[in-house]
Amino acid sequence: MKTLGLRPKLFDCIKGYNGQQLTKDVISGIIVAIIALPLSIALALASGVGPEEGIYTAIIAGFLISLFGGSRVQIAGPTAAFATIVAGIVATDGMDGLMVATILAGILLILMGVFKIGTLIKYIPFTITTGFTAGIAVTILIGQIKDFLGLTYPEGVRPVETMEKVEAVIHNIGTLNLAALAVGVVCLAILIIWPYISEKIPGSLIAVIVGIAIVKVLHLPVKTIGDLYTISNALPSLHFPHLSLGLIQGEFSNAFTIAILAAIESLLSCVVADSMINSQHNSNMELVAQGIGNVGSALFGGIPATGAIARTAANIKNGGRSPIAGMVHAVVLLLVLVLLMPYAALIPMPTIAAILFQVAYNMSGWRTCVTLLKRAPKSDLIVLIATFALTIIFDLVVAIEFGMIAACVLFMRRMAEESKVQGWEDFGEDMLNDPDSIELRKVPDCVRVYEISGPMFFGATSLLSNIRFDHKTRILIIRMRSVPAVDASAMKSLEDLYDKCEKQNVEIIFSHVNEQPADMFLRGGFMERVGFDNFCSNIDAALTRVKQILDIETLEDDIEVYGEDE
């Protein structure tokens, strides 16, 4: 790994590591484990699997990602971002489908890190990540309404899609359980108020304890985790899915979505952590670690995992400064699994729903959405709203695919609008202040000058049709000082323009061609076709070249006339 520039942060942190920092890391790891416990259970249930699967994920993936990760303080485990897609995979393809998708996602993440794609994640537009994150928050909230209200569905009604869940809630609202609603409201109030009382003890743990106490003491008819799931405190064991080519092919799109989500969320968490501790993470090593963690999680019965921003921030605030804290957090959860997991059966389902309501609120980023709605360009708003809506109505795969396509198309349209082709006579009075302005130079009547501005790519090549000349035109000057780049489509359009000029005996001169276009022209043989002398460094050199060409033509005409007289 070192030869590839992939070095786990743990190796760097061990240098100069001392007992004082070990104590801080251990204490922080224990506190983070307490925070992670109810969240891991709640997120597992929201993902359509049992509570122990959430703990397995936090243990296996949490330990491996801390061990191999590119961040000093990253805490990994199950997160809300995966809940909807995981629930859909489990409902349609079962646990084997989920295992295959998670393993494939892990392999993709490892490859992304090895081939140093970590830095490319920044090219995913902010509007897309904001849109689908807010959409996921809404789907989680909708998915927990049933348990928060204590609704009862008829036998066989098991909605998977978000809109199906909305329909089921509406049709069965008459089965509202007031006792469940009361428990949910009390727990939600605790989650909102508790941070003002204490930041040392997580509010989710207090809500779980109070929820259990209310239901047990008052003997309320409220469903608990034990009523719906069989709780096991068995250690995670290695097992493999029943593989088939069809299953692998079918799960690849889900794997790609999981990998992209894991990469985005983990690297975002790393950036936030860096700003809090004045450090710098290794993005590619972090992706490799995420891949290893997800493969390990799947093989030991877990679900997809990634860096969790809230748990990472809690680790930092409690003194954690090395991957040891994340590894301690995983070991503590392992002890909790063995010793205390049976007590998880007592947790009321409205309490779990209240915890997930808070998770949905925290991840929704509604303030960011409001700011974007007020300030962002219309094209960005289209991407944001479409990604948000598609995440809720359809699924995350459709939302991301559409969002990326729409963002690319709108970006290309914006760039095409910035590209211009103007003849020298079309420039206004403001050009007189430009020392390079063609207005300040004497141009023969038989010469036309056009200036191209902006990137020339396939979305802007039609602008070249604005270049016109008549039978009087002998030379065409194309100024390209404001063209940073051209693509193959633009190259073809320029070649077509040259062919047209050649047929009409019009010479082309290019002025101030920048490095990337010049390289394209040279490698494509276009520079040789036009003639190296016809590529000039600036407009003055181009006009000098015009004078040379016109003098040569005049000399040739004189020779012809002299020959006729003779």
Image (tube, rainbow, N blue to C red):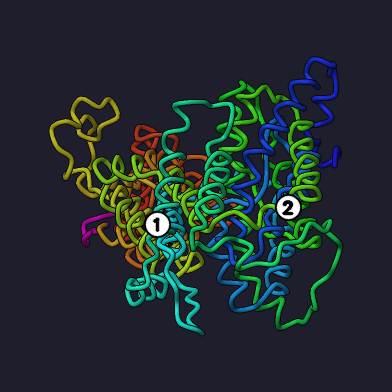
Left or right: where 309 falls relative to 320: left
Quadrant location, the C terminus: bottom left
Which residue is the site of mark 1?
Answer: 181
Crowding near pointer 1: few (<14 within 10 Å), some, many (20+)?
many
| Residue that label 2 marks | 341
Task: Please say if 440 is above or below 122.
Answer: above
Residue positioned 55% across, 38% down in the render? 206
User: On the rendered image, what quadrant is the N terminus found in?
Assistant: top right
Left or right: 389, with 122 as reference point:
left
- Which element carries disc 2, helix, strand or loop? helix
The answer to whether one can see residue 458 in this image is: no
The span shown in magenta is 467-475
Residue 45 image offset from top left, x and y in percent: 59, 61
Residue 560 sits in quarter: bottom left
* Magenta residue check for 348: no
Q: Position of residue 407 (x, y in %)?
A: 40, 56
Q: Which residue is at a point 73% across and 52% down the rendered structure image?
A: 341
Give the main secondary structure of the magenta stretch. Answer: loop
* Residue located 77% across and 39% down the image: 332
